[in-house]
Image: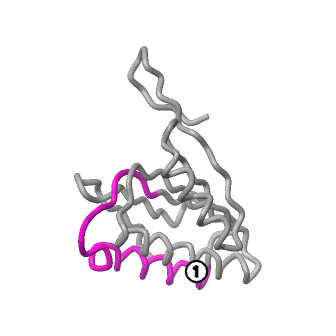
Amino acid sequence: MKNLYLKPTEETPEIILDRDKPEFKMSGKSYMEDATAHYIKVIEWLEEYSTGPNDKTVFIFELEYVNTASSKIVNDILDILEDMYLEGNEVKVEWHYFEDDEDMFELGQEYEEIYELPFIFQEIKYDRPNNLFEVD
């Protein structure tokens, strides 16, 4: 199984699915109109991965914005992760959100209520003097 990497664009997030590491990541903005076509490889990769996952799987969402079409894809990803978790695999979701971004924090909380998955929330604080972001 090959690793999957999608470079970020103005409308699409960076996606890192590396079979050799326990952490997968989706970060950036996601607001393209045809999200299904863009994310089909991600869903297929995760479905294949779920048939023989690593001992531990952590999926990190670090999203700045998600439109309705993209939120459906996040649901699809969480469906796959939940199935893996319910089959007895060690799976958790890390939901990173930028400080003062209540919308993304609340979206993560909504997902946590829907899915039977362990969620960890991490605020990303803006370090104003250096203009850097860092995860707490």
| Residue 127, image x, y percentages | 47, 22
Q: Is residue 31 above or below residue 34?
A: above
Q: Residue at x 38, y 60 (%)?
A: 66
What x and y, as percent, mark residue 90?
73, 68
In this figure, which residue is indicated by the disc labeled 1?
A: 50
Tell me the quadrant of the picture where the C terminus can be found. Answer: top right
SS at mark 1?
loop
> In the rendered image, which quarter is residue 86 located in?
bottom right
> Which residue is more in the foreground, 133 or 111?
111
Identify the magenta region: 26-52
Q: Which three-letter amino acid code belongs to the residue tagged 1?
A: Ser
Horizontally, residue 85 falls left or right of residue 128, namely right
Determine whether 85 is above or below 128 in the image: below
Q: Residue at x 42, y 82 (%)?
A: 44
Residue 58, compared with residue 121, is above or below; it is below
Residue 119, located in which quarter of the rendered image? Answer: bottom right
Q: Position of residue 85 (x, y in %)?
A: 70, 75
For the N terminus, the image quarter is bottom left
Q: Residue furthest top?
A: 129
